[in-house]
């Protein structure tokens, strides 16, 4: 299994195209919709493949507008997303499902929980997730804080700045090794747990992160630039407006995360009444993905089975 699996395409009612890939057990009706991080794309879903296959689940990793082959959607808001996901679920005849958001995928799964009925969306998991920026950015990498701030004024600039650093490698299959090496250099400046996670990463984890990054800029920088703006904008709902039954929402977070500080997750969990926050004090951003993906897949599978 490799991340070079061909993406499938769905034409939405408004004529836009959405791209997605299927991992794990393709024949299973137990379905998790995977929401990739930032900047990334459907290929990141490879992270879940082995666990999903082992536990008998199908993971559908979906590209948001402007990412990979999904059509760019000008001026989109966070709450525009659930309708797209539900259209895909309907097309694939998925009645009940869970959603999993990793890092920058967290806002989108929360939007799904807010908008999609519990008869359809029955469970939610978040790993190292981003929450509303008004909860505070203290402890977050300065470069990330600057990116969110700049995107409010010019997502065009943000997209092109990110694209500039990986332009040639992101669009060349032959240069994937170069992109992997570049990612490895960036990881060296992260907490030791993330450095160790990268150096000891499985083939699937590395391929997922590299392929995901390549797909984010496959058709240019506009999608990624607008994503950054969405994160720092008004989400259209407050976290304390979400109704959560016990056992239906689990958040995994690392105590040493500098991409999304644990203080942000702690504040969010207090607002998300009945959500379970599982903090691993020794883990950081990448390391908790490597350590907790299997647990997340199993947990969401149980949510589906008991809905």
Image: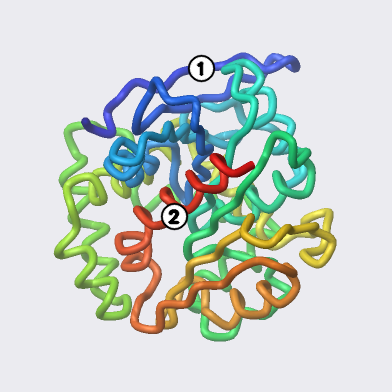
Relative horizontal placement of residue 214, taking residue 180 as reference (left or right): right
Towards the viewer: 79 or 67: 79
Q: Are marks 2 and 1 in contact (CB under 8 Å)?
A: no
Dot 2: within a 10 Å radius of its alpha carbon, few (fewer than 14), some, or many (20 or more) residues?
many
Image quadrant in which you'd find residue 218: top left
The quarter of the rendered structure image containing the C terminus is: top right
* 2 or 1: tag closer to the N-terminus: 1
* x and y percentages locating residue 213 in the rendered image: 37, 46
Towards the viewer: 184 or 163: 184
36 relative to 27, above or below: below
Q: Is residue 38 visible?
A: no
Dot 1: within a 10 Å radius of its alpha carbon, few (fewer than 14), some, or many (20 or more) residues?
some
The residue beneath circle 1 is 9
The quarter of the rendered structure image containing the N terminus is: top left
Q: Circle 2 — which element?
A: helix
Towards the viewer: 67 or 283: 283
What residue sits 35% from the left and 76% below the top? 283
Relative horizontal placement of residue 83, taking residue 144 as reference (left or right): right
Towards the viewer: 192 or 76: 192
How far is disc 2 from disc 1 in space, using C-alphas?
27 Å
The residue beneath circle 2 is 296
30 relative to 182, above or below: above
250 relative to 26, above or below: below
Q: Circle 1 — which element?
A: strand
* x and y percentages locating residue 9 in the rendered image: 51, 17
What residue sits 17% from the left and 33% below the top? 174
* x and y percentages locating residue 138 in the rendered image: 59, 85
What residue sits 34% from the left and 33% below the top? 24
What residue sits 67% from the left and 40% below the top? 121
């Amino acid at each position: 299994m490799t991340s070079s699996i061909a993406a499938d395409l769905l034409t939405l009612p408004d004529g836009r195209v959405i791209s997605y890939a299927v991992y794990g057990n393709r024949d299973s009706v137990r379905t998790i919709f995977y929401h990739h991080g930032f900047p990334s794309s459907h290929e990141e879903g490879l992270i879940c493949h082995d666990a999903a296959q082992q536990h008998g689940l199908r993971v559908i990793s979906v590209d948001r507008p402007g990412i990979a082959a999904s059509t760019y959607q000008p001026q989109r808001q966070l709450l525009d997303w659930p309708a797209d996901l539900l259209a895909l679920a309907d097309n694939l005849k998925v009645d009940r499902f869970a959603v999993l958001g990793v890092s920058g995928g967290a806002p989108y799964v929360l939007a799904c929980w807010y908008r999609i009925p519990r008869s359809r969306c029955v469970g939610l998991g978040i790993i190292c997730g981003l929450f509303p920026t008004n909860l505070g950015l203290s402890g977050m990498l300065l470069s990330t804080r600057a990116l969110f701030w700049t995107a409010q004024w010019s997502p065009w600039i943000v997209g092109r700045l990110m694209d500039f650093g990986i332009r040639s490698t992101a669009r060349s299959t032959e240069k994937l090794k170069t992109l992997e090496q570049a990612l490895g250099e960036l990881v060296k400046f992260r907490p030791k747990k993330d450095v160790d996670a990268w150096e000891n990463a499985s083939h699937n984890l590395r391929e997922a992160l590299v392929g995901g990054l390549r797909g984010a800029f496959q058709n240019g920088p506009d999608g990624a630039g607008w994503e950054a703006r969405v994160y720092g904008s008004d989400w259209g709902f407050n976290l304390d407006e979400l109704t959560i039954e016990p056992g239906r929402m689990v958040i995994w977070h690392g105590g040493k995360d500098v991409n999304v500080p644990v203080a942000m997750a702690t504040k969010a969990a207090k607002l998300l009444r009945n959500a379970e926050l599982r903090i691993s004090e020794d883990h950081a951003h990448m390391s908790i993905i490597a350590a907790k993906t299997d647990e997340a897949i199993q947990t969401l599978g149980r949510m589906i089975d008991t809905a």
